[in-house]
Amino acid sequence: MVARAARHHPQQLPLQVQLPDDELFSTYFAGANGEAVAWLKQLASQTNEPDSTDRFSWLSGPVASGKSHLLHATVAAASAAGTRVMYLPVAEFADVTEPRSLLDGANDFQLLLLDDIDHVLTASDWCFELFALLNSVLDRGTTRVVMSASQAAVQTDVELADLKSRLQWSTAYQLQPLSDDDKARALILRAHWRGLDLPMDVALFMLHRLGRDMRALLRSLNTLDTASIAAQRRLTIPFVKQALTI
């Protein structure tokens, strides 16, 4: 869900975004990204005031590298820990003409997650509001902010120079792409969460026939989950071929 705070009383926005219930830390195959996962887990569990190292965090990586999955997982873990958390999928609101209406009160939360923030950093109105928000976060000293983007902050185009400078203060993690074997293991992990047994050879077959895009592979896994239940069949290569018509 997207949540925000009123001036002094946190509450939900009338507009809500439902987060996937299967995007948790337990369903994320870290591979070479263990440090980033550990950092986000730490942020999700913190209830004390932030310091200079964890006030701003920047998570970067290409499309389908798992940035949103990790932010969704952070929301779930923070909520379970009793942390007041706000998640905003910025790309979905890039056309909002008054970003203040979304960001006003965001610093009333202990943890603020701004996913795909780079989608609005060339828009002057967004830049001014984000700069004001981050300055407010610094002044109040009670909120941790996690931002995700495609590239490192220094490589990201930002309309407002002062905002770009502020973003570069972040503790930064660059997600590393998974190898084919690790993508197969990621599929197996998600299948197990669903109660499915996905053998390694079947997972690799899916990669070779369906491509390496994890979002597309996970959508196919959803289809296989439904088909397997309906047919009462195990996930074998012949069944995958039949269910996905490949």
Image: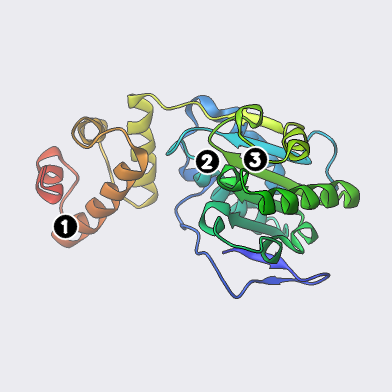
What whole-number distance in Å separates the C-alpha atoms at marks 1 and 2? 34 Å
**Residue 232, placed above or below residue 116:** below
Q: Which residue is mark 3?
A: 40
Q: Which mark is residue 25?
A: none
Neighbor class of circle 2 (other Cα within 10 Å; few <14, some 14-19, many 20+) is many
Frontmost of labels 3 and 2 is 2
Place of residue 163 in the rendered image (x, y in percent of width and height, measured from the top left): 75, 40
SS category of the residue bearing label 2: helix
Query: Mark 1 or mark 2: which comes first in sequence?
Result: 2
Place of residue 220 in the rendered image (x, y in percent of width and height, measured from the top left): 26, 48
What whole-number distance in Å separates the C-alpha atoms at marks 1 and 3? 38 Å
**Residue 129, placed above or below residue 69:** below
Q: Name the residue at the right extreme.
A: 139
Frontmost of labels 1 and 3 is 3
Place of residue 8 in the rendered image (x, y in percent of width and height, measured from the top left): 83, 70
Q: Which residue is mark 1?
A: 232
| Amino acid type of the residue tagged 3 in the rendering | Leu
**Residue 125 versus residue 56: which sits nearer the camera?**
125
Residue 108 falls left or right of residue 224: right
SS category of the residue bearing label 3: helix
Residue that appears at 12% across and 46% down: 239
Residue 191 falls left or right of residue 48: left
| Amino acid type of the residue tagged 1 in the rendering | Gln
